[in-house]
Structures are given as structure tokens and as C-alpha cells.
Image: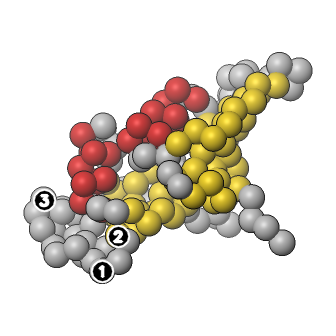
């Protein structure tokens, strides 16, 4: 058995690609347009690791309501080189840090479609530092 990808539906493809690629740092591996079905598929992965992919599914027709997130789905998780630097880049890009990396090890953010993203520091936790150390949790993740 071989793991292929996790699919998430997105309502604004441009905003989602900005979040996942420019801010989070994933790279687009392939894209396919399906005019007959009126949808686009975009496959993303962390640089150098194209075996764990995220498939963004964008339906061209406007959705009457936001997609609901089922309780069975938890989050996407990524190990990162520098948790503080990534959280700073995300925050500068307008992303709310829901669970700040107070411990230098873990943080949570959410995508434009409210998909929870867990960010884990590669290797040992970073020494605690401000502004993260005193930043409270915000919202849910």
C-alpha cells in the first residue's frame, strides 16, 4: 500500500495557493482542469517530499455555503526547519496563529478554508522566545 494524498476542497483557489505556496512554502506539483466536471485539481507538496501530497479541489461553480469540516478530519501536519521564522512569515501574510509556538515545538494555523495545519519544529524544540512565549491561543484549530 502506498499513501498518495489528502484532498481538501477550497472555495478560492488563488487565496488557497497564496496560503499553501507563498506563505506556508509548499510547491505545486501538477494541475489539471476538468471543464466537463467544472473543477480544477492542484497537487502540492513540501519541497523535496512529493510522496505526501495535498490535493486542492476547486469547484468552479460558487458554493451556496462554506464547506463543512467533519469531526473525523483533524489536521495536516508539516515538520519545518524554523518554526519561529515560518510563523512570522505567516503572520506577516495575514494568517492568524491560532496556537502560537510558545514551546518552540508546535503551532497551529488555519487555511483560508479553515483546514487546521499543525507545524512542528524539526529536531529539538527552539528556545522559547517572544512574541510567541506570551501570545495566547486564539480561536479553534
Could you tell me residue 123's position as x and y percent? 35, 77
Q: Residue furthest left?
A: 130
Q: In this view, does 125 lie above or below 109?
A: below
Q: Mark 3 points at which residue?
A: 131
Q: Where is residue 105 in the image (x, y as percent from the top left)?
A: 31, 74
Q: Is residue 118 visible?
A: yes
* Residue 69 visible from this viewpoint: no
* Crowd class of label 1 (few under 14; some 14 to 19; many from 20; radius 10 Å): few
Query: Circle 1 sits on which residue?
Result: 124
Looking at the image, which residue is at 60% across and 45% down? 44
Task: Give the crowd class for mark 3: few <14, some 14-19, many >=20 residues within 10 Å.
Answer: few
Q: In this view, does 52 lie to the left or right of 25?
A: right
The image shows residue 117 at horizontal and vertical percentages of 48, 57
Q: Quadrant of residue 73?
A: bottom right
What residue is disc 2 on?
Answer: 121
Task: Look at the numbered disc 2 and give the secondary structure of its residue.
Answer: strand
Indicate left or right for 103 with 65 as reference: left
Give the side of residue 16 with respect to residue 51, left or right. left
Q: Which of 12 and 128 is in front in this view?
A: 128
Q: Look at the picture and state if 16 lies above or below 109.
A: above
Amino acid at each position: 500500500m502506498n499513501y498518495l494524498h489528502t484532498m481538501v476542497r477550497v472555495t478560492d483557489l488563488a487565496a488557497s495557493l497564496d496560503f499553501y505556496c507563498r506563505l506556508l512554502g509548499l510547491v505545486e506539483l501538477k494541475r489539471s482542469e476538468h471543464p466537463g466536471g467544472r473543477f480544477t485539481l492542484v497537487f502540492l507538496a513540501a519541497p523535496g517530499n512529493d510522496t505526501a501530497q495535498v490535493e486542492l479541489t476547486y469547484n468552479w461553480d460558487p458554493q451556496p455555503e462554506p464547506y463543512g469540516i467533519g469531526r473525523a478530519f483533524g489536521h495536516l501536519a508539516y515538520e519545518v526547519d524554523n518554526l519561529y521564522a515560518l510563523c512570522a512569515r505567516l503572520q506577516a501574510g495575514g494568517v492568524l496563529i491560532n496556537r502560537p509556538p510558545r514551546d518552540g515545538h508546535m503551532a497551529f494555523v488555519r487555511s483560508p478554508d479553515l483546514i487546521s495545519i499543525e507545524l512542528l519544529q524539526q529536531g529539538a524544540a527552539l528556545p522559547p522566545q517572544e512574541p510567541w512565549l506570551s501570545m495566547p491561543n486564539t480561536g479553534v484549530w
